Amino acid sequence: MYNLFKLISLSHQNAALEVRERLALNEDSAKSIMLRLKDFFEITDVLVVSTCNRTEVYYSSSVDHNDEIIKLLLIEKGIAQVDSYAPYFQKYNDGEQAARHLFEVATGLHSQVIGDMQIPNQIKHAYQWSADLNMAGPFLHRLLHTIFFANKRVAQETFFRDGAASVSYAAVELMEGLMPNPKILVAGLGEIGTDVCRNLVGKEGVEVTLINRTRSKAEDLSGELGFRVADMADLEKEVAIADIIISSIAMDKPYFTKEMMVRLRGMSFKYFVDLSVPRSVSPEVEEIPGVMLYTMDSIRSRADQALEKRLNAIPKVREIISEAVSEFNDWSKEMVVSPTIQKLKGALEQIRREELTRFNKSLNEVEMEKVDRITASMMQKILKLPVLQLKAACKRGEAETLIDVLNDLFNLEKEKSDH
């Protein structure tokens, strides 16, 4: 089963943002793709992972469908230039490599923000979609639960999840410590401003307003995240209302000035978080009573410290993953011999039942119950050594020879057809 596991992957490592955006999948489109895969191909254990940084399809099949799945995905997304987009995908045909890749993605080793804390939940959502459509078999169930346990070890045994390791994460972490239930104005929706907005999703008691020179961009993001949108012309009015202003406005000189703050006299206490380079908030705003400014340098310093701790934890994270992959590898190999073990148990149980039936009339109920227990115990002890030998042969890669011997000795193939 392990060797049947495959993967196609498109990620930030080999595709630009505009490419990833076109191939991103929400829950409905991911489930639609999965149903198409089920209709068109003989595959099992399907997992579709889609985040802002990657779109991946994992599946089990004896046939390599990678190129066909890429074409299907592109067609489903309305992309006719298949040959232009196909090179962005990485293809994995080796089961252990595909499984290890999923371990590394799920722990955040492949994230843009190393150790991304959102990725485990995104993998859990993808797993739930597979379960909802009955497309997660025993192999995928075991694989995902092994990954979740490895993730738990990473959180408990390393610093890989500690601190905010990106500027946008660090900015949101900073804001959470400033005041409860703030009104937040995000001015400028470039890459970093958009990242901040996505990291604000789900924060309790937070009211977020978006302003951008191009209003349509703010409206698109509002449609995705559910935040309020205001016009650029109303910026000063929105600043007066807000408790925290996050600025990532791109311009050559500060947009928020001391003069603007003087015009807004009578306003409440305010925090500015300037994420722009060059700066979009003048340092002089702090001369106004009740105004505090946090710059990119101070926030980046927090992020850099957290990132250093996470980078130092990578060797331990890889060690945990290797142990988990090895454990899963052993289990997967044992799946190969599981049918033989079940047939052997069935053959011995049939012999035991037949012999019990022969003596049924000559024994009373109490005697029959004792004989049943004794023979069942004997059968378990007889089975123990062959089962242990089969599992050991799996680890040595010699299971097929022993399976053939057991099939011949006990005529297991005949037993299967008789049943």
Image: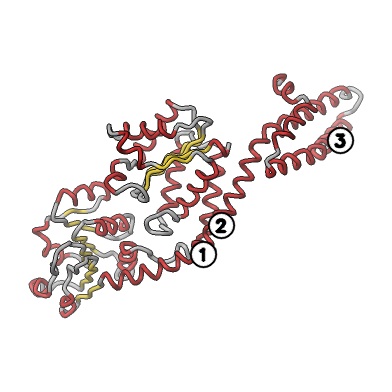
x and y, in percent, of residue 305 in the image? 39, 71
The quadrant in which the C terminus is found is: top right
Residue type (three-letter) at the residue carrying disc 1: Thr
Q: Are marks 1 and 3 in contact (CB under 8 Å)?
A: no
Mark 3 or 2, nearer chain start: 2
173 over 321 or under it: above or below: below
Q: Are marks 1 and 2 in contact (CB under 8 Å)?
A: yes
Residue type (three-letter) at the residue carrying disc 3: Lys
The answer to which quarter of the image holds residue 381 is top right
Q: Is residue 370 visible?
A: yes
Mark 1 or 3, nearer chain start: 1
Identify the residue at horizontal 26%, vertical 59% (top origin): 192
210 over 82 or under it: above or below: below
* Along the line of sight, the residue nearer the viewer: 133 or 322: 322
Please tell me whether mark 2 sits on a helix, a strand or a loop: helix
- Chosen colour scheme: secondary structure
| Mark-to-mark CA distance, 1 and 2 | 10 Å
Counting other residues with Cα less than 10 Å from the Cα at mark 3, is it few (<14), some (14-19), or many (20 or more)?
few
Residue 320: which disc? 2
Q: Is 221 positioned to the left or the right of 341 in the image?
A: left
340 over 113 or under it: above or below: above
Identify the residue at horizontal 33%, vertical 55% (top origin): 202
The answer to which quarter of the image holds residue 181 is bottom left
The residue under label 3 is 370
